[in-house]
Image: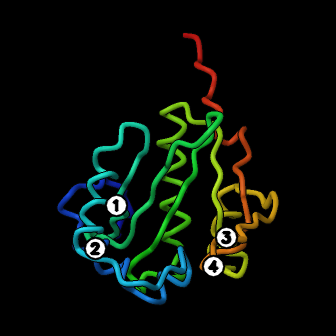
Amino acid sequence: MPKLSLRKTTNFDKKYFAKWWRDEDLIKLTSGVLEPISEKEIEKYLSAMVKSRTDYHFMIVFDKKVIGHIALAKRRSGWYETQIVIGEKAYWGKGHGAKAVQSLLKKAKRLSISKIYLEVRPDNLRAIRAYEKCGFKKIKTMYYPKNKYLPKTLRMELKSELLTPSPKVLE
């Protein structure tokens, strides 16, 4: 049976980001920035991901094929923002995003990360359902009037008890 796993992002993953960051359908669901991205910019962003000492970046692998990217980025006050993209459209709507988020949350728990949120386009109902399935709750609408590509998002936060490390059993 095919298995979904996460592996650390490396500089060798450039080809995936080059494809996904130029895919209009994906861009409309994520940043909305439709301006072309150069090879140099892709290398810069990928290098920052790989070198980061505070953020965690993983490639989503299903049946030995890279199908997406997921991250936990450190923000203020102990919060981490998660971001995910299933870049390979043939894998959309099959539950892989929810499974990747669940795998990431297990890693977060081991890292003692207990405050996780995400922001999603309010009309990306498929993603919102997947996040709710993983325990995220709708908190509020965020407005970014200066961002012509993404002026409004839905902030969702994880119920913290899902991430609280389990008490150790005394033997």
Along the horizontal axis of the image, is 106 left or right of 16?
Answer: right
What x and y, as percent, mark residue 145? 72, 71
Q: Amino acid under label 3?
A: Lys
Q: CA distance from mark 1 to mark 3?
A: 31 Å
Q: Could you say whether the residue bearing mark 3 is in a helix, strand or loop?
A: loop
The residue pinned by badge 2 equals 16
Q: CA distance from mark 3 to mark 4?
A: 6 Å
- Mark 4 and mark 2 residues within 8 Å of each other at the beta carbon: no
The residue sitting at the top extreme is 171
- Mark 3 and mark 4 residues within 8 Å of each other at the beta carbon: yes
Q: Could you say whether the residue bearing mark 2 is in a helix, strand or loop?
A: helix
Q: Could you say whether the residue bearing mark 4 is in a helix, strand or loop?
A: loop
Mark identifier at residue 138: none
Mark identifier at residue 59: 1
Is there any visible trace of residue 8 in the rendered image?
Answer: no
The residue pinned by badge 4 equals 148
Neighbor class of circle 4 (other Cα within 10 Å; few <14, some 14-19, many 20+) is: few
Neighbor class of circle 2 (other Cα within 10 Å; few <14, some 14-19, many 20+) is: some
Please report the residue visible at 28 percent of the width from the left and 44 percent of the height from the top: 51
10 or 163: nearer the viewer: 10
